[in-house]
Image: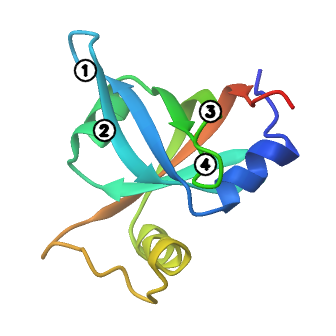
């Protein structure tokens, strides 16, 4: 059953905080990547390139954890544990990475795209949402 992304977690996801995404390698060891994150309804959205390690890991094992310490208070930690429910490629992923570039770096078009790079949206359903206590 999905956990709810409460208002505190939503605010942190809507801000320009960098998140650390942990996935599992073939042998069960963790692999961690910094990512930009977004939220739609009760779903966390991450955009990556097809073929990157995190994308390969998640296609094999959809379990994922995201963690951040907001830039305005690095002494607290937010954690979202969940699983990828959908991989969306093509035009929607291309449009979304441009949206994320606008959010995070103020540019209309994502400037770091490699020639021939294909993008993919990872839709993550939260199983557990951990927010700091007041």
Q: Nearer the viewer, residue 87 or 34?
A: 34
Q: Which residue is mark 2?
A: 54
- Of circles 4 and 1, the one toward us is 4
Q: Give the spatial CA distance, label 2 vs label 4.
A: 22 Å
Q: Which residue is mark 3?
A: 77
Mark earlier in primary sequence (2, 3): 2
Residues under numbered marks 2 and 4 in contact, where contact means CB atoms less than 8 Å apart: no
User: How would you rate the neighbour count of disc 1 (Cα within 10 Å): few for under 14, some for 14-19, many for 20 or more?
Assistant: some
Residues under numbered marks 4 and 1 in contact, where contact means CB atoms less than 8 Å apart: no
Q: Secondary structure at mark 3?
A: loop
Q: Which residue is mark 4?
A: 70
Mark earlier in primary sequence (4, 3): 4
Mark earlier in primary sequence (3, 1): 1
Q: Give the spatial CA distance, label 4 vs label 3.
A: 7 Å
Vertical comparison of 133 with 108: above or below: above
Residues under numbered marks 2 and 1 in contact, where contact means CB atoms less than 8 Å apart: no
Quarter of the image where the C terminus is located: top right
- Of circles 3 and 1, the one toward us is 3
Q: What residue is drawn where x is 64% and y is 55%?
A: 72
Residue 77 is situated, as x and y percent measured from the top left of the image, at 62, 32
Q: What residue is drawn where x is 25% and y is 74%?
A: 112
List the single residue furthest toward the left: 115
Q: Secondary structure at mark 4?
A: loop
Residue 121 is situated, as x and y percent measured from the top left of the image, at 46, 56
Q: Secondary structure at mark 1?
A: loop
């Amino acid at each position: 059953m999905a956990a709810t992304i409460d208002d505190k977690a939503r605010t942190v996801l809507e801000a320009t905080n960098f998140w650390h995404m942990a996935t599992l390698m073939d042998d069960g060891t963790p692999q961690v990547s910094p990512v930009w994150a977004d939220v739609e309804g009760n779903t966390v959205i991450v955009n990556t390139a097809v073929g990157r390690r995190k994308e390969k890991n998640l296609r094999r094992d959809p379990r994922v954890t995201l963690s951040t310490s907001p830039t305005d208070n690095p002494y607290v930690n937010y954690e979202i544990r969940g699983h990828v429910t959908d991989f969306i490629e093509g035009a929607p992923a291309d449009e979304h990475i441009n949206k994320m570039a606008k959010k995070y770096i103020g540019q209309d078009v994502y400037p770091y795209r490699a020639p021939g790079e294909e993008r993919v949206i990872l839709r993550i359903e939260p199983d557990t949402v951990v927010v700091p206590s007041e």
